[in-house]
Image: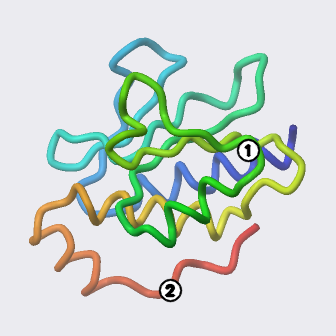
Amino acid sequence: MKAAVRRWQTVREFALGLPEAVEEFPWGPEDGVVKVNKKIFVFLGNADGPRPPGLSVKLKDETLHGHAMAAPGAAPTGYGLGRAGWVSVPLGEEGAPSARVLCEWVEESYRSTALKRHLKERDARSGPIPPIG
């Protein structure tokens, strides 16, 4: 569970470091999301609940989507979002993706949501995703 929380924290910090990303809690303190341009690009939930944390990202790229769906416990996101490419990935499963892979997915989800000016800013200050977890 500690490793899952560390991965979750790393992903949250990464997402909030993207240009103009903001964290909101539209359904209460247990349901954190990160948005850009008033649109959600990652559902984070929280890391303090009774269950291990997880996240949901939108992956339009077929290869990334397939990779995410192959993660232990991964499933199409509920409420019909799975049809639009959203994938929910639990972080407490044995063999869960590394924080680095999760951050790559978050960046892909961000890129599918952000405006061109956000992407230009991201690319201008972008270094590689840090070698984490």
Of the pair 68 and 54, the residue shown nearer to us: 68
Tag 2 residue: 128
The disc placed on residue 91 is 1
Q: Tell whether 50 sits left or right of 58.
A: right
Task: From this view, report whether residue 115 is shown above or below residue 29.
Answer: below
**Residue at image location 15% in from the left, 48% down from the top:** 37
Q: Position of residue 82 (x, y in %)?
A: 42, 38
**Residue at image location 70% in from the left, 72% down from the top:** 132
Q: Considering only order in the chain, which callout, 2 or 1, is on the residue closer to the N terminus?
A: 1
Task: From this view, report whether residue 102 is shown above or below residue 91.
Answer: below
Say which amino acid is labelled 1: Leu
| The quarter of the displayed image where residue 107 is located | bottom left
Q: Position of residue 89 (x, y in %)?
A: 63, 44
Across the whole image, how many numbered discs are drawn on residues? Answer: 2
The disc placed on residue 82 is none
Q: Tell whether 7 sits left or right of 128.
A: right
Say which amino acid is labelled 2: Pro
Secondary structure beneath dot 1 equals loop
